[in-house]
Structures are given as structure tokens and as C-alpha cells.
Image (cartoon, rainbow, N blue to C red):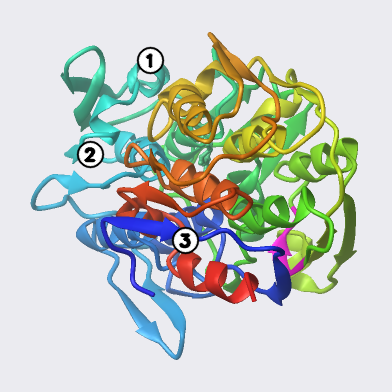
Amino acid sequence: VTACADMVVRPCAAVRGILRVPGDKSISHRAAMLGALAEGETVIEGFLESDDCLGTLNAMAALGAPWERRGGRIAIRGVGGRPAPPSGPLDLGNSGTGLRLLAGIAAGQPFVTEFTGDASLRSRPMGRIKEPLERMGAGVELLGPGGTAPLLVRGGALTGIRYRLPVASAQVKSCVLLAGLFARGPTTVEEPRRTRDHTERLLEAMGVGVRREGDAITVEGAGPRRPRLAPAARAVPGDFSSAAFWMAAAAAREGCEVRVEGVGLNPGRTAFLEVLRRMGAEVNVAAARGADSEWEPRGDVTVRGGRLDGTEVGGDEIPNLIDELPLVAVLGAMAAGRTVIRDAAELRVKESDRIRAMAAGLAAFGVPVEETPDGMIVSAPAVLRGGGEVHSRGDHRVAMALAVLALAADAPVRVRDVACVDTSYPGFWDDLERLRG
Ligand code: S3P
């Protein structure tokens, strides 16, 4: 099945099967960037060849690190810590991770880099990276209205800083740490809430020291010398956030069972499993062993469906399941009682305003839903009404979450504008067909 403008999702009685999902998006971005900065060649297995991550690979090629496909893997020729000036603007498409992390690297280079992206990316807040990068000594000009991209990063001699993140964001943390690699002295980032640590793990795996003390993470900068990253052959695990769609599809209905194999289980990403358990789903995890698992934990997750109860999600849990919150809303629409999401105002500045997009999507199914400034309150309707249409608003996770809900509706549902799914999960519609049996 190829993704087209719209997709009509027919309901099904049960979702069953065993599958693997494509590689982790967050880890693939980082592997592309750090592989490109390393000395010599980095070979990556399981790299996510989605629009977002290919965009990052191509941006790194524009900075002097060409890549090629080799037997199902991606091979990158690293620049040894010395990127070359790009000949034009770097277009990161839909990807906030691509743009924000790369801006950190660009800040440490003795040239100007221009970044741009699609309409969604050009609407997302970039002041959050401008502030710390300027404190380190870079110049960051936000050319879009209200502190948005396109942006110009004037790199140069950076000095390490100690920076407390105003919002819990792995992208901003990573941006500052990556700039810190090129700075004079140590750079420390303090997190108000723990976020995913893929950058830290990969840096350590490549031989760069990373210190963690409480909520502070420190890297030692190379200053005028270049940071040295050791290349390695690595296997990226399946993306937990992609696997979560099938876990949710199975969780709320009797007779459903899905096993996702080889999926990433980084403890900074798996709070959704706790939410599933809390709601009453049966969740089994079999952790894998081996060198790759020491770098990034992985294993098989089996979810067996049943009747769910509503739950509350907020506080420290939020960064750990930020990308799964559309699915928490979907589960809320199938669970007894109320499901409350709070402390999640960040959802409003993702690829779309995910609070608004999900509330509108759920309402189209007849789901009682109330939007709040930092979340939503969802209850199950008497019947999950199909027959209508919902809109992705160009947001891949909204499109997929609403498609999952449509599987349980009483009639087919048209999901509008689903090409965006390719930014993170090429093959989603094929997997959906397979699991519906
Ligand atoms: C990501 C961090 C999160 C997440 C995004 C990927 C990353 O964003 O939502 O999908 O790879 O660092 P924020 O850092 O903006 O919360």
C-alpha cells in the first residue's frame, strides 16, 4: 500500500500478529550526525530511512560527509570533527530534531549555516536554541515571524556554559551538548525533568566522556582542537514510538495480541508501557542482551488486550511519553471512566498543535473530549462512531493515532492528508493491513 493523500481505514474485529517496526527516529538522527563528525567510516544497521532522517543524512553530506547504502546499511564517511561550509541552506523538512541538533553542531563551526524547513517546522519555536547558543558565543538570527526558522547560525569560538533548560526538551539539551563538543571548557545542561538520553549514550559509545550528576549532564569541549569521535558499526533498535501504535491498537480490545520484536527500550522512552499497565492491559517485556543492547536497550514487547480503565498522565512522566500522548488520548476514548493528560503544553508546539488536532479528531468519532491549556480530558462514548473523516493536520503521529482509533469504530473512517506518515514510519499502512488479519 503506498501512502496517498487520504486513507480510508476500515474497522476490524481484532488486531493480531508479530512484527518489527522501522528503526528509531531519534537514534537515527544522532547516528547520522555523530557518524558524520567521526573519524573514518561509520556503518549503521537499522537506520530509519524516513523523510526526516534522510534529510539529516543529506544535510550532513552537504557539510562534507557523504553517505551511501551498502547491503541494507548506511555507511557515512566522517569529517573527523571538521565539517565543511555548505554551499546553500540546509532544509530539514518536517524535522525539529534534525534542525535543532544540527544548529548546535553548526554553532561550533567557523562559518555561517542557514537552516530552513517545511511550513510546520517554520512555525515551531527556535528561541529555545538561540538563547543558549548565543550565550556560548554563536550568533543565531531567527528570520521567521515570532522567533521561527529560517535561521542563520554564525558559528565560531564557543565557550562552555552551565545551562538550565526552561522546558524539558531532549532536542534543546542535545543542541547545547553538541555545541559543547566544540567549546572551550565544560558545558553542563540541567534538566527540569529527565528527557531521552540518546545523545549522551551515543557520545559515550563513540569515546566522548559524558558526566551525569543528578539532573546535570556535562561534556568536556575540545575548544580549538577538534572533537574526536570513534566510528563504530551499530544497530539501531526499532522505534518504540512507532511500536506504540500497535500496542495501543491491541490494548483496549479483548482478543487482540501484538508482539513487536527488536524494539528500543531505553528507560527514557518507555513510560507508555507503565500507562498501558495502569489502564489494565497485559504487557510483557523480554529484554535482549548483547553489545548493542548495552548501548541502547532493546527487546520484544507483547501486549494483550482487555477492558481498560482511564488514567491520569502528567508530571515527570510527560517527557518520557511525549510522542505517545496522542495514543494515550486514543486509549482514553476506549477506556472506562476519564483519562486526563496534563503538564503537556509542549504538545502544542510539535509537528502540529497535537492537543487541538487530537481533540478535533476524537470529537469526529463522537468521543467526549475537553481541551485544556496543557492537555485534555477524554471519556469513552457509547459507540465509537465511524463513517466520517478526520484530519492529520500534516502531523504523522496524529494521522497514525487516528488510524488506530478507526480500527475500533463502527464504520470506515477517512483519514485526510496522510503523506506525513513517511516522516517517521514508512510501511505503516502495510503493517496495519497485516495486523488486521
Ligand atoms: C526528540 C525529542 C522530543 C520528541 C521528538 C524527538 C529527540 O522533542 O518529541 O519527537 O529526538 O530529541 P522535544 O525535545 O522538543 O521535547
Q: Which mark is residue 131?
A: 1
- Label whose residue precedes the other's in the sequence (2 or 3): 2
- Marks 2,1: beta carbons within 8 A: no
Q: Amino acid at mark 3?
A: Tyr
Res. 210 image quadrant: top right
Circle 1 packing at 10 Å, graded few (<14), some (14-19), many (20+), is some
Q: Amino acid at mark 1?
A: Glu
Can I make out residue 126 in this image?
A: yes
Residue underneath mark 2? 110
- Describe the element under mark 3 as helix, strand or loop: loop
Circle 3 packing at 10 Å, graded few (<14), some (14-19), many (20+), is many
- Find the magenta span and give its range: 258-265
Direction from residue 361 to residue 195 in the image, left or right: right
Residue toward you, 345 or 149: 345
| Spatial separation of the CA atoms under disc 2 and disc 3 | 36 Å
Q: Is mark 3 within 8 Å of ligand 1?
A: no
Classify the position of the C terminus by image quarter. Answer: bottom right
Residue underneath mark 3? 425
| Spatial separation of the CA atoms under disc 1 and disc 3 | 32 Å
Res. 426 image quadrant: bottom left
- Label whose residue precedes the other's in the sequence (2 or 1): 2
Classify the position of the N terminus by image quarter. Answer: bottom left
Can I make out residue 111 in this image?
A: no
On the image, the x and y values in percent for residue 157 come to 32, 30
Name the residue rendered at 63%, 65% in the picture: 238
- Marks 2,3: beta carbons within 8 A: no
Which is in the foreground here, disc 1 or disc 3?
A: 3
